[in-house]
Amino acid sequence: MREHYRSEDFTERDLSADPMDQFARWFRQVAVGGVLHEPNAMIVSTATPDGRPSSRTVLLKQYDDRGFVFFTNYTSRKGRELAANPYVSLLFPWHPMARQVIVTGSAVRVSREETVGYFRTRPHGSQLGAWASAQSTVVASREELVSRYEELAARYPEGEKVPVPPDWGGFRVIPQTIEFWQGHGNRLHDRLRYVREGAEDAKGGEEREGAEAAYGEGAESARWRVERLCP
């Protein structure tokens, strides 16, 4: 099975000076007009300290000069892996437009204030679901999961304020590289990659908080070089 891509060339002249501006430009294009279902869906890949990888689809909830934000249970598999090994990769598979965006970097937890602010925007049922599901743990049956949810729905009916779970919150992925991939015929794809210069990757603990400050002060503080990769 093979698709013959047909699209315009994507050259260095087409790039914004800042990769987050370039991401915003492409994201607007895929989000407008229903070209793509859930354009904010991204594949998040993590790994254990000894290099065993895992991937799953997660919804991007925010992006700005500081990076890409998603929310999860901190005790889930990805949460545990990121606590032990903060290095992460994101993949936006925008197939209908023959495009991909690939991000590598380090994940740091967002502030509790950011987590609470986002949690309050979630539908009531999703708030309850964050409590009902001990994400990534074994559950005996769907009935058990639904029973937990129903108990919570009785405790916090619609209109009742649901507290934010203590082990639930956001991660911000601070990019080290951002690659923009445009498909073309004959496998002559365009791959343009921004590489951040002048800062080291985050390590963990307090070093990770320092890394967020170093990376996340805004586009004006970041220096990027652009590389073209063979397809």
Image (cartoon, rainbow, N blue to C red):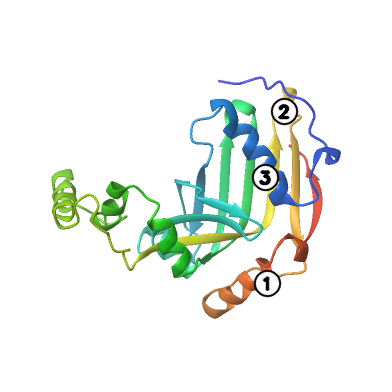
> Alpha-carbon distance for marks 1 and 2?
38 Å
Residue type beneath disc 2: Arg
Judged by depth in the image, the label closer to the viewer, 3 or 2, is 3
**Residue name at image x 50 percent, y 50 percent:** 61
Q: Using the rendered image of the protein, determine whether residue 48 is visible from the camera's viewpoint.
A: no
CB of mark 3 within 8 Å of CB of mark 2? no
Dot 2, crowdedness within 10 Å: few (<14), some or many (≥20)? Answer: few
- Report the side of 59 relative to 132 (left or right): right
Q: Which residue is mark 3?
A: 23
Of label 1 and label 2, which has the lower sequence position?
Answer: 2
- Report the side of 114 relative to 9 (left or right): left
In percent of width and height, residue 214 lies at 68, 72
In percent of width and height, residue 224 lies at 79, 57
Judged by depth in the image, the label closer to the viewer, 1 or 2, is 1
Dot 1, crowdedness within 10 Å: few (<14), some or many (≥20)? Answer: some
Say if 21 sits above or below 84 in the image: above
In the picture, residue 198 is in which quadrant?
Answer: bottom right
**Residue name at image x 51 percent, y 77 percent:** 205
